[in-house]
Amino acid sequence: MPTIAFYRSQFRASPNHRHLITSTGLPFFWLADRMHMLLRHLQRPDIDRYVQTRAAQRFSVMQMSALPGPDAMTVPNAYGLLPFNDGDVTQPVEGYFAHLDYFVLRANLLGMAVALEIADAGIVGSAITEENAVGFANYLSNRFQEQAVIWVLGSGDAPEDAQRQAIWSQIGQALKTNTKGRHLIAYLPSRSATAGASWCQGESWLDIALQRSGPAYNPLAWRAVEAGYIATPERPVLDGGPCAEDQPTIAGEEDGRLSAQQIRRLVYTSVFAGGCGYTYRNHSVECCHRVSDTVDHARTPWHDALFDPAAEELHFLRLLVESRPFQVRVPDQLLVANQASNPAHQPLGTRADDDDLGGDCGSYAFIYSPDGSPVTVDLTRLSGSMVVAAWFDPRSGRGRWLGQFPVRGSRVFTPPSADDWVLVLDDASRNYPPVGLGSDRGMSI
C-alpha cells in the first residue's frame, strides 16, 4: 500500500539513461493519466474520487496543468478563482494554488507522482514573459520542493517560436536551479510541432523527452518514440500527448470512436519501441464531461468513463514490465524475423540488454502482436541454451504457458486468437516467475 513516504519521492534517470528510477534506485514505470483541465472543473470531493480510482487502477503518474488552456488567465477554477490578481503573474492568488496543492498532496499520498504542466503555451509570451518567467517558476517550485512532482514544459497548441523557446529555457533553468536538480523536467511539444522536443534536446535542464503523437489515431505513432530514443544525448523518452480512448475519429461525429484495442496498440508499441512509460488519455474524462455538456463530443459522464476498458487494462502492461528487470530493457526489432506486408500490423519487440558475454542478446524478450498474426522469432537474441515461452493477454493480464525451446535459429509462435497478444520469452536459467496474473498451469506472480 502507498505510504506517506511517497510524498517525498524523487526520481532520476536509470544508469543507461533510458528508464526512470526513484532516488533510492527502485524502478519507476510511468503510467500516467492526462487530465489537464482538472483544476478548472473538479472540486475537492471530485478530485478525491478521481485520484482514488486511478490509484486503484495502478496508474503511477497524474499529468495535469497548473494553468490549463490558452484562456487560463480569464477562466476561473472550480471554485471561481482566477490564478492571478489583475492577470499579473507576479501576483498569484493563494486560493487558486491551494487547490493545486490539494490535488498534488492527494495524488502523492496515494502513491502517484504528479507530472505538472507549468502552463499552456498559449499564454507564454503574453502573460508569462521573459521578465516574470523565472519568478513564476520559482514560486511554483518553492511550493512543491518536497513533493513527488515532475515538471512538464511546453504543451498547448501555440507555435514553438523563438520567443516561447527562450522563455521555456528560462523556466527550465530556474526549476533546475531552485530545486537543486531534485525534480526531473520534461518537455511536451506543441501540437504544431512536427517532431519531438528537438529544439531543446541539448538543453542541460531537460531530463525526459516527451513525444506528442496525437490527436489523430496513427498505428505507427510508436515511430515518434523510436526517433526520440535514438536522439542524443540519451534520455528517457515516452509518448506524453497521444490521442484518447473514446475520442471521435472525426471531430463532431458521434460514431467512430477510438476503441480500447486501438489504445492498447498505441501503448504497447510505444513502450516496446523504447518508451519508459506512456500517458493515457480518455476523451470524456479529460473534458470532465457532464450530461449537460454538448460541445465537447464526449458521450459518457467523466466519473463513468474512468472505468472505460483501456483504463482498466493498462495496468497489465505495468505488471508485465515490472515482472522483469526493466532498467536494462531496450527496443530490438531484430527479434522479429518476419515482416508484415502492412507496417501497421508489424509485431514489435523489446528485450533485456544484460548478456554477461557482451553479445546482442538478453535474458528476456517481449514481442507485441497487434492482430494475432504468427510471429517468427530469432531465438539467438536470447541468452542461455533454453527459452521458456508464454503468451500474455493484454485484456486480462493472464499468461498462457507454451513450454521450453532450445535457443537456436528461428521459431514461429502463433497467438491464441486474432486479438492482440504479447509473446514472453525468458532465459530458462534465470528462473523468472511465470508471467501474468494466472495461467493454464495455475501459476501466478
Image: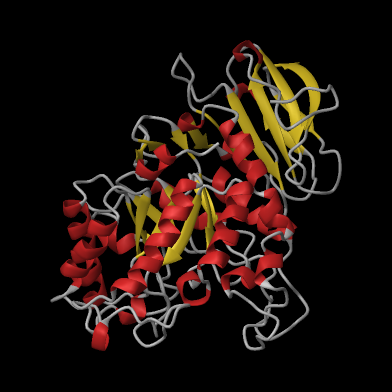
- The residue sitting at the left extreme is 131
Position of residue 260 in the picture relative to residue 68 (left or right): right
Identify the residue at image location x=35%, y=39%. Answer: 13
Residue 380 position, x and y percent, is: 61, 22
Position of residue 112 in the picture relative to residue 82 (left or right): right
Number of numbered discs on residues: 0
Residue 86 in sight from this viewpoint: yes
Instruction: Give above or below for 321 relative to 164.
Output: above
Q: Quadrant of the N terminus?
A: top right
Identify the residue at image location x=39%, y=65%. Answer: 100
Residue 141 position, x and y percent, is: 25, 58
Residue 200 position, x and y percent, is: 28, 60
Q: Which quarter of the picture shows residue 95?
A: bottom left
Relative depth, front residue between 175 and 212: 175
Q: Quadrant of the C terminus?
A: top right
Identify the residue at image location x=81%, y=49%. Answer: 419
Position of residue 126 in the picture relative to residue 132 (left or right): right
